[in-house]
Image: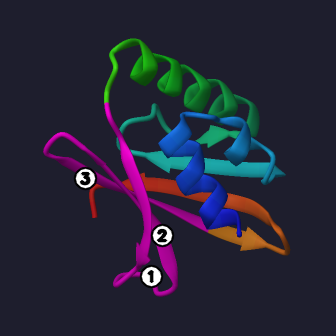
Amino acid sequence: TILHDIAQAWNKLDAGLIIKHLYESFTFNSLWADGTLNKDKFCEHISNMFSDIKMHKIQISASIVDDPYCGGEMVKLCWGNNTSYFRILLEGHQIIKADMRAY
């Protein structure tokens, strides 16, 4: 599934596992990104983020969990004492929107 690929992307720090599912007009929002990112900016953002995580040897654990706020499922990301959640909105079999939040 797409959520499985997203969890694997974070566990393996492989941005390609997310990027391959993005719709052409994809958008991303996060407290940790500067405004709304389009597909190209997100691809650059996530690739740079994964490179930084690898460089600093940060251990991340990603798993699929129920989403009590929006329904369905989301990917829970844990590193150190931090937790965030990666949610997606699909159109057909492609991600049209994603966001990352602390809840």
Q: For the point 33% across and 15% down, which residue is it?
A: 56
Amino acid identity at mark 1: Cys
Closer to the chain start, of discs 3 and 1, is 1
Q: Is residue 83 above or below residue 9?
A: below
Provide the residue designation for mark 1.
70
Q: Is residue 6 above or below residue 52?
A: below
Residue 72 picture location, percent across and down: 52, 85
Provide the residue designation for mark 3.
83
In what element is the residue under mark 1?
A: loop
In what element is the residue under mark 3?
A: strand
Foreground residue, 37 or 89? 89
Q: CA distance from mark 3 to mark 1?
A: 18 Å
Marks 1/2 in contact by CB < 8 Å: the verdict is yes
Closer to the chain start, of discs 2 and 3, is 2
Amino acid identity at mark 2: Met
Foreground residue, 21 or 7? 7
Foreground residue, 48 or 59? 59
In what element is the residue under mark 2?
A: strand
State the quadrant of the N terminus.
bottom right
- Magenta segment's dominant SS is strand
Q: Residues within 10 Å of mark 2 (few under 14, many from 20)?
A: many
Q: CA distance from mark 1 to mark 2?
A: 9 Å
Residue 55 is a magenta residue? no
Label disc, if present, on residue 74 of the rendered structure: 2
Residue 89 picture location, percent across and down: 64, 69
For the record, the magenta segment spans 59-88
Q: Nearer the viewer, mark 1 or mark 2?
A: 2
Q: For the point 34% across and 20% down, which residue is it?
A: 57
The colour scheme used to paint the residues is rainbow
Residue 23 picture location, percent across and down: 82, 54
